[in-house]
Image (cartoon, helix red, strand yellow):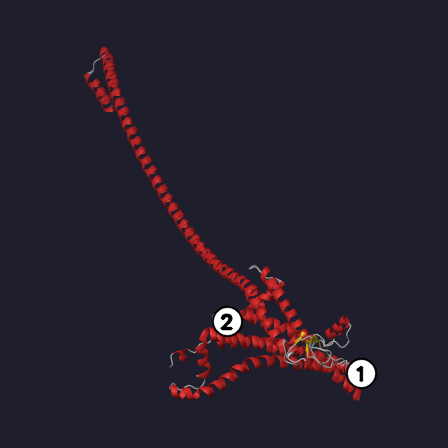
């Protein structure tokens, strides 16, 4: 029993470890016992090594799959856009137009300002995040095993769902955050943005009271501002990570006798069907929230312009 | 599960894909969709206009048909009247002509009768004279001849 539990834990841990390429410091004792004479960029051979690489490491699988899927999105949509004509749309073009129109409508409803970048960004997020989430529906062992067979390394770490890596989701959220700051500064100016952060939400109209309220206001506004990208990234990550985890657990049950196999098959099917909803919903939520944040960044509180 | 350089890489990737979509995917797609929207809108408008035109044409045709019918009726009416008039005129003319012919014939007959009478009178007179001569050469009986002459004169 102990051995079995050990392998199950090992299986799960193996599935949750990214393929890491990073820098190990000089004098580091590697997993196989060798000691590095100087700091080197190398592939991590164990979770410990990956952890010890610290910040200077790259998840090759996360970036590889996300870039690959992003390129797939760009290729498919750019081709559809190039071939598009105003005649009767057929096949893939009508699908692309359906998605585009859906996103366009949504953005028009939630984003009343003038910015041509927001709608394409929403489309990119929706389709790209959906594609990345979709990788979750590929049975958990298929691609890692294929990769292990191709590379000849049985212990190759290979995570195929980029959105189960907080780096990916928080990375996107960070980019959204940067755009929020950028558009806030562009639309309101530095002064306007600072005023928004310090004279909100409590505001009396008398300057000496407002001066006293600045620290309190700033604390509240800063927290709510920073909470936006973090919640945006962690929501997607949490949902997909949990989904992936359950797929892994179900995959373990496959090995437990005939009954386990049948039970796991049913469970896997049930969870996958449910998960179709989750991955679409999460991609949609990420897109909508990004659009809402962009709208907030563009929103000018006219009432504040007249104060002072 | 560690936060590392991947975060930055993903951010850059994200922005790159957004830029690509913004530049190369969105404008042509939306352009085409708007173009089609306009096409459909103008098509619908044209259809509506065409159906209006059709309705108008139909009404016009009906009106013209009615007018034509009225005109035809009028023409037929006129023609009938004219025909009656012509018949009337012809009748009158014929009557007048008949009367005239009758009058002329009567006058001629009268003339002929008068002439015949005249001839007859002159012949009777001659006859009477010849008869008288004959009678005279044979026997003059004034009384007896008187009656005879008187009878003759009365017969004329």
Residue B128: x and y, percent?
A: 24, 17
Taking the spot 20% from the left edge, 15% from the top edge, the residue there is B141
Residue A51 lies left or right of residue B102; in this view the side is: right
Residue A108: give its label: 2
Q: Which residue is mark 1?
A: A257
Helix, strand or loop at mark 1? helix
Q: Nearer the viewer, residue A118 or A209?
A: A209
Q: Counting residues from the N terminus, which is met first, the one under dot 1 or under dot 2?
A: 2
Kindly indicate the quadrant of the structure image that contains residue B124: top left
Taking the spot 26% from the left edge, 18% from the top edge, the residue there is B123
Q: Nearer the viewer, residue B148 or A216?
A: A216
Residue A134: x and y, percent?
A: 66, 74
How far apart marks 1 and 2 lie (CA) works out to 54 Å
Residue B40 lies left or right of residue A308; in this view the side is: right
Kindly indicate the quadrant of the structure image that contains residue A24: bottom right
Helix, strand or loop at mark 2? helix
Say which chain tag 2 marks.
A
Residue A43 lies left or right of residue B139; in this view the side is: right
Mark 2, residues whose alpha carbon is within 10 Å: few (<14), some, or many (≥20)?
Answer: some
């Amino acid at each position: 029993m102990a051995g079995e539990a050990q392998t199950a834990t090992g299986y799960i841990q193996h599935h949750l470890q990214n393929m890491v390429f990073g820098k190990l410091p000089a004098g580091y004792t590697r997993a196989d016992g060798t000691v590095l004479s100087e700091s080197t960029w190398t592939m991590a051979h164990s979770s410990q090594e990956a952890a010890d690489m610290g910040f200077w490491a790259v998840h090759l699988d996360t970036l590889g799959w996300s870039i690959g899927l992003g390129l797939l999105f760009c290729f498919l949509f750019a081709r559809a856009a190039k071939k598009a004509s105003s005649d009767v749309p057929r096949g893939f073009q009508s699908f692309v137009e359906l998605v585009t129109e859906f996103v366009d409508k949504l953005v028009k409803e939630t984003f009343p300002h003038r910015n041509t970048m927001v709608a394409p960004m929403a489309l990119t997020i929706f389709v790209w995040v959906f594609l990345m989430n979709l990788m979750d529906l590929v049975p958990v062992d298929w691609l890692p095993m294929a990769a292990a067979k191709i590379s000849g390394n049985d212990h190759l770490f290979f995570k195929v769902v980029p959105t189960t890596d907080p780096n990916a989701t928080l990375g996107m959220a960070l980019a959204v955050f940067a755009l929020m700051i950028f558009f806030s500064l562009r639309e309101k100016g530095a002064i306007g943005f600072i005023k928004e952060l310090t004279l909100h939400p409590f505001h009396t109209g008398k300057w000496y009271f407002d001066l006293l309220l600045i620290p309190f206001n700033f604390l509240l506004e800063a927290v709510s501002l920073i909470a936006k990208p973090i919640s945006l990234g962690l929501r997607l990550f949490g949902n997909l990570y949990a989904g992936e985890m359950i797929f892994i657990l179900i995959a373990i049950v496959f090995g437990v006798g005939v009954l386990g196999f049948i039970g796991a098959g049913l469970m896997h099917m049930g969870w996958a069907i449910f998960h179709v909803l989750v991955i679409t919903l999460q991609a949609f939520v990420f897109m909508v929230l990004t659009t809402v944040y962009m709208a907030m960044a563009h929103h000018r509180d006219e009432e504040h312009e007249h104060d002072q | 599960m560690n936060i590392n350089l991947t975060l930055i890489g993903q951010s850059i990737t994200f922005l790159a894909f957004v830029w690509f979509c913004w530049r190369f995917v969105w404008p042509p797609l939306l352009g085409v969709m708007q173009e089609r929207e306009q096409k459909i809108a103008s098509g619908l408008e044209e259809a509506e206009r065409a159906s209006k035109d059709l309705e108008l044409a139909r009404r016009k045709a009906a009106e013209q048909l009615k007018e034509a019918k009225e005109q035809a009726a009028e023409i037929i009416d006129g023609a009938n009247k004219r025909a009656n008039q012509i018949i009337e005129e012809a009748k009158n003319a014929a009557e007048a002509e008949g009367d005239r012919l009758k009058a002329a014939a009567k006058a001629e007959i009268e003339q002929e009768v008068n002439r015949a009478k005249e001839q007859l009178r002159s012949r009777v007179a001659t006859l009477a004279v010849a008869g008288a001569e004959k009678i005279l050469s044979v026997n003059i009986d004034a009384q007896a001849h008187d009656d005879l002459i008187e009878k003759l004169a009365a017969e004329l």
